[in-house]
Structures are given as C-alpha cells and as structure tokens.
Image (cartoon, rainbow, N blue to C red):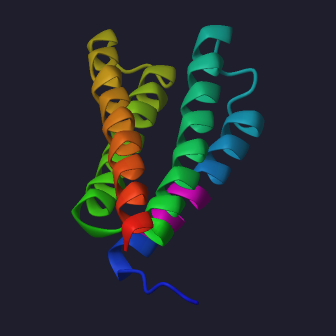
Amino acid sequence: MRHPVARGAAWWLALAGGGGVLLGAFGAHALRGRLDAAAMEWWHTAVEYQLWHALALALAVHAGRGRAGRIAEVAFAIGIVLFSGSLYALALGAPRWCGAITPLGGIGFVVGWIALGRSLSLSERS
C-alpha cells in the first residue's frame, strides 16, 4: 500500500539524496588535487553523513507517523544542512568558527533518530 508523502518532504528527500551523489562526484573529480588531505576528509565525511541521513529521511518520510515522524523529517533535514553543510564549507576554506556549527547538525541527527524510533513504535500500535 502506498503511503502519501507531502510534496515538501519529497523534495527535501530528492535534494538530500541526489545532492549527496552530486557532491560526492564533485569532490572525487573536481576537488581531487585542489584540496589538502584534511579538507578532502571533511568533504568525504560530509557526503557520507548526507547520504546515510538521506536514507534515514526516506524512512522517516515513508514510515514515520504522527508528530514524531514529522519531527524526525525536520531534524534529519536540519542535521544534513548544518552538519554536512558546515563540513563542506570548512573543506572549501570557510573560517574555522564554522566548525562550531557541525555539532548542532549532529544533535539534529540524534533528535531525528530518537523521533524516528518513537514514530515507528507508535505506528506499531496503530
């Protein structure tokens, strides 16, 4: 049975997943040799977390229920923007203070996982 998905959530999911693939390819091809090893590692970590959490966002969008499901969707999206976005910025030479944003994205990821777990436990009772 198909679960209806809000258009905004579907676009966030497409942007997170597709963007992660494009940014990974960009890092592997266009940035290789232009960034030092530390910057390439930041880029790689950003892509990896973005793609894993795009999958988590897909699960939240598809299987999440109620308020907890919506919180999971928003928290994963915010986590991707703050965590991965700050690492992309650092890799491209942003000021070091941008690194202070990264843990806020990590908190978004943790909130997302907790909310997703709660949401899935609620759907079990339905």
Q: Decide whether the magenta segment is chiefly helix, strand or loop.
A: helix
* The magenta segment: 11-18
On the question of residue 64 being in view, the answer is no
x, y percent for residue 30: 71, 37
Q: Position of residue 96 (x, y in %)?
A: 33, 10
Q: Is residue 87 left or right of residue 2?
A: left
Image point (59%, 26%), residue name: 45
Is residue 47 shown to the viewer in this render?
yes
Residue at 31% in and 45% down: 78
Front residue of this view, candidates 83 and 91: 83
Residue 81 against residue 70 in the figure, above or below: above
Image-quadrant location for residue 52: top right
Name of the residue lying farthest toward the front: 125
**Quadrant placement of the C terminus:** bottom left
Q: Position of residue 72 (x, y in %)?
A: 34, 53
Q: Nearer the viewer, residue 93 or 77?
A: 77
Residue at x 74%, y 26% (from the top left corner): 32
Asked whether 25 or 66 is in front, the reply is 66
Taking 38 as reference, is 50 above or below it?
Answer: below
